[in-house]
């Protein structure tokens, strides 16, 4: 049974859309212009900016008296509330599981938010297990987090595949371990010269299909 390591945000579950939805609601509540969503998306940097820094940026720009922790909590809850599991992705995961693959999510992020997304969307039904950087104490692309994911499924890393959208965290992490990988390009071009994914796909379903046929 081969191990299938999977990223979470903007791989199995859309993060960009839920963050935008939360951001538009938040800006409307504080009386900010609707077009400021572009500024907020730049600050967030597709989830790469620490959530506390996003909160402080909002406080500074709009002179908010609300605490940073309240903004962080609202961000967490808003993203979770707006996150949905695509039924076609669920179907593809089931097919992979039926074919003998053992799917394990390996994700960077806050434990409370990431686990809530996994459980509330029903994604947990299609996974053998998951590992979240905050609770594991180590983040992708560090090899240890991939080893922790494999260990939780009682699997070996040898022969595993990694699917994800981050060139460094997902594909770089896989490359460092000698694993095959599929990169979700999301309209971007591959620019890293030191390594490259085994395959490139336009979404999780195509990525899963590439693994099953590879």
Image (cartoon, helix red, strand yellow):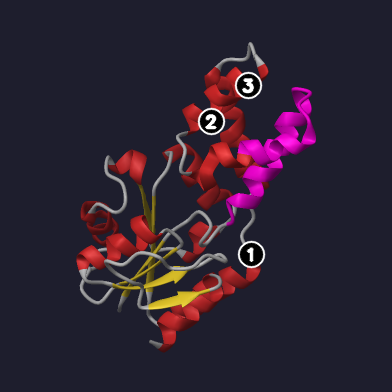
Residue 103, by quadrant, is: bottom left
Q: Is residue 21 above or below residue 29?
A: below
The span shown in magenta is 14-40
- What residue is rendered at 48% in x and 45% in y? 114
Q: Which residue is mark 2?
A: 54
| Viewport quadrant of the N terminus | bottom left
| Residue 19 magenta | yes
Q: Nearer the viewer, residue 42 or 183?
A: 42
> Is residue 156 visible from the viewing direction of this image?
no
Disc 1 vs disc 2: which is toward the camera? 2
Q: Secondary structure at mark 2?
A: helix
Structural crowding at the residue carrying mark 3, measured as other residues with C-alpha within 10 Å and reported as few (<14), some (14–19) or many (≥20): few
Magenta span: helix, strand or loop, mainly?
helix
Q: CA distance from mark 1 to mark 2?
A: 27 Å
Q: Residue 59, how many percent across, how many down?
A: 60, 19
Q: Which residue is mark 3?
A: 61
Q: Is residue 189 above or below residue 73?
A: below
Mark 3 vs 1, N-terminal side? 3
Residue 121, by quadrant, is: bottom right
Q: For residue 86, which numbered disc appears in the image? A: 1
């Amino acid at each position: 049974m081969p191990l299938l390591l999977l990223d979470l945000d903007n791989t199995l579950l859309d993060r960009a859309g839920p963050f935008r939805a939360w951001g538009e609601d938040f800006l409307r509540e504080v009386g900010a212009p609707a077009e400021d969503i572009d500024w907020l998306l730049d600050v967030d940097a597709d989830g790469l900016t620490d959530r506390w820094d996003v909160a402080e940026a909002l406080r500074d720009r709009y002179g908010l008296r609300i605490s940073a922790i309240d903004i962080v909590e609202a961000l967490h809850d808003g993203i979770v509330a707006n996150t949905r599991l695509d039924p076609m992705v669920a179907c593809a995961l089931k097919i992979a599981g039926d074919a003998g693959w053992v799917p394990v999510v390996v994700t960077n992020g806050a434990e409370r938010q990431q686990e809530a997304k996994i459980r509330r969307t029903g994604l947990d039904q299609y996974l053998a297990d998951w590992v979240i950087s905050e609770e594991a104490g180590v983040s992708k692309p560090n090899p240890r987090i991939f080893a922790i994911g494999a260990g939780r499924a009682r699997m070996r890393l040898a022969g595993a595949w990694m699917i994800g959208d981050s060139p460094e965290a997902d594909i770089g992490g896989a490359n460092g371990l000698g694993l095959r990988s599929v990169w979700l390009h999301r309209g971007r071009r591959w620019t890293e010269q030191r390594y490259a994914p085994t395959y490139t796909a336009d979404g999780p379903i195509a990525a899963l299909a590439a693994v099953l046929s590879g």
